[in-house]
Image (cartoon, rainbow, N blue to C red):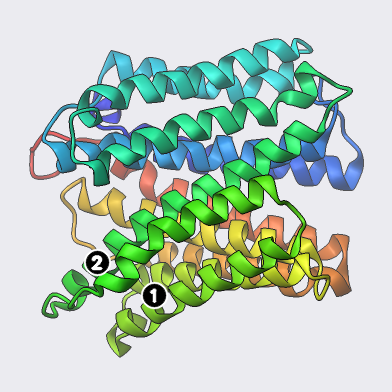
């Protein structure tokens, strides 16, 4: 089946479907007080599912596809890929239909173990710049396990917070590494410009800064050091917006969306820094990073990769452009209007998020489920 020919096909489609449903469940629960059999704390569930469910699926689809290009080695397809997909789906459904919370934990962690094993053969002997993704997937699975701690140990929920914020930081590291590779490349290819000169200082300095951020956010949470490292990291990334900018990107939706998603990450780091200092609500930084950074970046990447890896022209439909605009607006509403509008802003932002992903499903369902028009594999 074409649907299971490469990892991006099922995982991108199911990420969009799952992201829609997860947000629908969240907003119905928040607005109407619905309860679900295996969900004791809906905030913890929402936090976990958006990070490790939705974003985890996008990361899985991207890595299972890109690792083949990076290493020349195969990643699961066919039945093994289908098995991993089924585990992901069952993990998402488990807390909504079953009171057996340990089943939810077991299925969710089984997915991360399965993804790690799926990437092991291709990455373990690869260059370090690619092998690091194996470590990051392992850490993301560990963070997912910690995020479940309130289920395993209800009297010690602190580790659940640690797991969630550790997961967010690891996802940011993955996004920044991937973004640093693909955004300038996509801009250069999309605008048919000469390859941009690299900045060795910025590139070599980023990994140590990311490690320091991870350590400080984990070990010195809610201290001024968190504000300092997040501010420094944001400033370190800021020159990339200047280096990568070209007026031509504003005529290419698959370029301006990636560019603005990167800008949202920088803004989110700044707001997270200011939140620790008490200058703004700490949730502003979280949602700038998640809705703006992760939401827009994942939707843009899925749209671009979904066309490129199925042998189609990199020209999004008008509906896709609308979806990108809706995701951008969802971030603006959630970050900048929540303090004044409260629940209404949550509902509007959630509706925009869901509509953006629903449009992606409508546009990309035939693209991701049918064979490539050029007859090639993949």
Q: Is residue 18 left or right of residue 206?
A: right
Label drawn at residue 256? 1
N-term mark: 1 or 2: 2
- Where residue 12 sits, quadrant-wise, is top left
Q: Is residue 117 above or below residue 234?
A: above
Q: Is residue 150 left or right of residue 287?
A: right
> Residue placed at 46% from the left, 36% from the top?
57
- Where residue 10 sits, quadrant-wise, is top left
Percent from the top left, x then y, of residue 222?
Answer: 77, 56
Q: Is residue 251 above or below residue 293?
A: below
Q: Is residue 303 above or below residue 196?
A: above
Q: Nearer the viewer, residue 212 or 8?
A: 212
**Residue 307 visible in rendering:** yes
- Identify the element where label 1 is drawn: helix
Mark 2 sits on what residue? 186
> Residue placed at 30% from the left, 72% from the top?
201
Percent from the top left, x then y, of residue 128?
Answer: 24, 42
Q: Nearer the viewer, residue 300 or 185?
A: 185
Q: Residues within 10 Å of mark 2 (few under 14, many from 20)?
A: some
- Identify the element where label 2 is drawn: helix
């Amino acid at each position: 089946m074409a649907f299971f020919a490469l990892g991006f096909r099922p995982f991108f489609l199911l990420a969009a479907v799952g992201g829609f449903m997860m947000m629908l469940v969240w907003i119905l629960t928040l607005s109407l007080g619905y309860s679900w059999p295996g969900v004791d704390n809906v905030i913890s569930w929402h936090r976990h599912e958006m990070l490790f469910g939705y974003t985890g699926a996008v990361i899985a689809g991207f890595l299972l596809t890109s690792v083949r290009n990076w290493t020349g080695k195969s990643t699961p397809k066919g039945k093994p890929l289908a098995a991993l997909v089924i585990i992901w789906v069952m993990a998402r459904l488990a807390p909504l239909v079953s009171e057996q919370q340990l089943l939810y934990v077991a299925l969710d962690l089984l997915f991360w173990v399965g993804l790690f094993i799926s990437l092991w053969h291709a990455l373990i002997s690869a260059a370090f710049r690619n092998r690091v993704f194996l470590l990051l997937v392992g850490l993301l699975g560990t963070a997912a396990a910690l995020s479940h701690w309130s289920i395993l140990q209800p009297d010690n929920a602190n580790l659940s917070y640690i797991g969630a914020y550790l997961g967010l930081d690891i996802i940011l590291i993955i996004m920044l590494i991937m973004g640093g590779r693909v955004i300038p490349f996509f801009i250069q290819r999309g605008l048919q410009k000469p390859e941009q000169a690299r900045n060795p200082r910025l590139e070599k300095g980023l990994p140590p800064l990311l490690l320091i951020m991870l350590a400080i956010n984990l070990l010195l949470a809610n201290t001024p050091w968190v504000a300092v490292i997040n501010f420094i990291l944001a400033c370190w990334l800021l020159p990339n917006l200047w280096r990568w900018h070209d007026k031509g990107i504003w005529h290419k939706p698959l370029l301006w969306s990636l560019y603005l998603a990167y800008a949202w990450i920088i803004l989110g780091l700044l707001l997270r820094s200011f939140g620790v200092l008490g200058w703004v609500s700490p949730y502003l930084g979280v949602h700038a990073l998640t809705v703006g950074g992760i939401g827009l970046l994942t939707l843009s990447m899925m749209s671009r990769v979904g066309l490129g890896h199925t042998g189609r022209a990199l020209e999004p439909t008008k509906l896709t452009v609308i979806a990108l605009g809706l995701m951008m607006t969802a971030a603006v509403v959630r970050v900048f209007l929540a303090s004044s509008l409260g629940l209404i802003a949550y509902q509007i932002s959630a509706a925009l998020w869901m509509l953006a992903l629903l449009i992606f499903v409508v546009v990309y369902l035939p693209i991701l489920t049918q064979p490539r028009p050029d007859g090639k594999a993949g």
